[in-house]
Amino acid sequence: MSSLSEFAQVTRRVVVYAALAVAAYFALVLLWKMATAIYFAINPPPEPPPTVGFGTLPQLNLRLTDVKGTPAYVLETPTGQLPEMANRAEVVAMASPVVTLLGEEKARELATKLDFGGQGTLSADRKTLTFTDSPDKRTLVVNVITQDFQLSTAASRIVKLAKGVAPSPTSATESAKRILAQQLGLLKFGFEAGNQTTAFFVSNGKSLLEAGSSSEAHLTEVSFFRTLTDVGSQNYPLLSPNPKRGLIRVGITTRLSPSILNTLSIYFEAAETEIDKTKVETYPIKTPQEAWDEMRAQNKVAYTKLTGELDSVTITGISLAYFDDPTYQAYLQPIYVFSGVGKIGRSEGEFITYVSAISSIWVQQP
């Protein structure tokens, strides 16, 4: 019995020591992980350099216009300072344009869908087909190479409509989506999931002017924008040369028959803008200070309604976006967007301008 008792005592000791050893092991592992985490939090490993896999990038054609005058640029962001930005951003390849020998045929198919008859008139350089609808004063011009197109209704025709026939923003947007997606099959390349903005317009018989409300307007124009998603850690807006107008714009009115005539205009400049998200590289970008200095030095504007010499420009917002070029660009590149208010005497108006965000050493120089 004594030997059995001794064996039991030894077994208990072995079990206790084994349990203590296991506990000590896991405690050491936990302490090691905590110490490692604390060390790397204090001394993070260096970030790998940008991939720059596309090599030197072509310059963006931002289509900025010169600012009249030499205004003082004032920074008045919510913090009173330039924002903090990452030191790099994604650059995404654009799908190469598809060249087709059926350009004229496709243009005529589009014309039929928009209720234009005839074969159209081919330009001398064989680049555009023009269709006319004389009774309703409509014109359709299609680029047979890119398949971009412009449908327009004469201002002299629109002015005869009653004011107040412009649909609400919600109704106009639904109509524009239906026309592009169901009737034309052209709501794609990310525009189907993007954002839309609306504006009211009134005709004076010669041109279209912005109206203050639907009760004063002949039509509602819907602009289609898209967002860069599923590429980096953030989603960024895509902005065209005019940040207020998308690469796809549809002008809608009501009460005309047949219903196709309620589509007064379509401006489609998105035929060569398909993004290839399988080809992404990272590039160093300018610091906010570098972009701020460049913006002041270039003294150019992407959008403003002010027409005289500016006295000052107060910048209230600085952000990153991507430039959506209506003509083919090999790569989708980031831009700094500076927004604020310009002033001429006591008059003031919205002011927006762009600066290419990619570090200059990675951009081809003229």
Image (cartoon, rainbow, N blue to C red):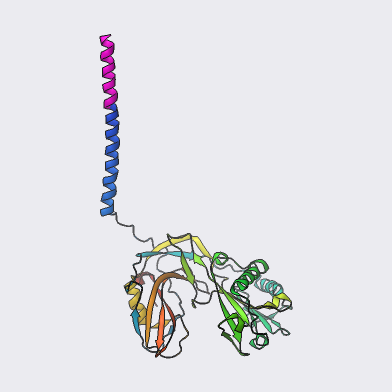
Q: Position of residue 60 (x, y in %)?
A: 44, 74
Residue 300 colored in magenta in the image: no
Q: Position of residue 109 (x, y in %)?
A: 70, 71
Which image quarter holds the N terminus? top left
The reply to whether residue 361 is in sight is yes
| Residue at the outermost top position | 1
| Residue at the outermost front position | 215
Against 363, residue 201 (above or below) is: below
- Say which of 171 and 325 sits in front: 171
Please tell me in which quadrant of the rendered image residue 297 appears: bottom left
Give the residues in magenta. Answer: 1-17
SS assignment for the magenta stretch, majority: helix
Q: Position of residue 146 (x, y in %)?
A: 59, 73
In the image, taking residue 8 as reference, residue 236 lies left or right, namely: right
Please tell me in which quadrant of the rendered image residue 52 appears: bottom left
The reply to whether residue 334 is in sight is no
Q: Could you tell me which residue is drawn at 40 percent across and 62 percent down? A: 282
Q: Position of residue 34 (x, y in %)?
A: 28, 45
Q: Could you tell me which residue is drawn at 37 percent across and 64 percent down? A: 88
Please tell me in which quadrant of the rendered image residue 201 appears: bottom right
